[in-house]
Image (tube, rainbow, N blue to C red):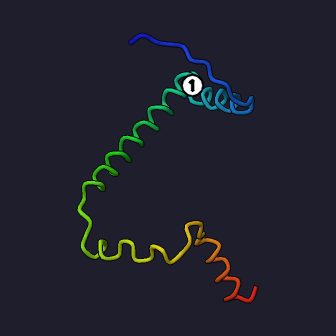
Amino acid sequence: MAQSKLTLSMEPEYIEMAKSYAAEKNISVSKLVKNLIQEVSKKRDINDAFLEKLRNEPVSPKVQALTGIIKGKYPDNFDYRDAYREHLSKKHGL
């Protein structure tokens, strides 16, 4: 397979980290980047296959019955984390 060239730009501390790590592993920075890209691609492919399987899985009648049960009860900009913090604050008197 023919090789192409690529120039990457990043902060100097990350370049030094990459060089140091590559030296520890006795590989080139190019090989390090290649390995990282391969790992990310494998995880994405596995994740995509899992998600595809879930998309094809039928939804149970119980879950379908719950679909939309709280729709319209809260505004679109409702943040459950803020509501939970408020609940804890009241509960613990903070």
**Amino acid at the residue labelled 1:** Asn
Residue at the image position 39 percent from the left and 38 percent from the top: 42
**Percent of width and height locating residue 78:** 59, 70
Task: Using residue 24 as the reference point, say whether residue 44 is left or right of it.
Answer: left
- Please tell me in which quadrant of the rendered image residue 62 appears: bottom left
**Percent of width and height locating residue 7:** 61, 18
Q: Secondary structure at mark 1?
A: loop
- Please tell me in which quadrant of the rendered image residue 79 appears: bottom right
Along the line of sight, the residue nearer the viewer: 20 or 48 = 48
**Percent of width and height locating residue 50:** 33, 51
Q: Vertically, is 36 above or below 91? A: above
Q: Vertically, is 18 above or below 1? A: below
Residue at the image position 34 percent from the left and 51 percent from the top: 51
Mark 1 residue crowding within 10 angstroms, few (<14) / some (14–19) / many (20+): few
Residue at the image position 61 percent from the left and 77 percent from the top: 84
Task: Using residue 17 as the reference point, say whether residue 30 is left or right of it.
Answer: left
Along the line of sight, the residue nearer the viewer: 64 or 51 = 64
- Please tell me in which quadrant of the rendered image residue 69 appears: bottom left
Q: In which quadrant is the N terminus drawn?
A: top left
Q: In which quadrant is the C terminus drawn?
A: bottom right
Q: Vertically, is 64 above or below 54? A: below
Residue at the image position 65 percent from the left and 26 percent from the top: 19
Residue named by callout 1: 26
**Percent of width and height locating residue 20:** 67, 29
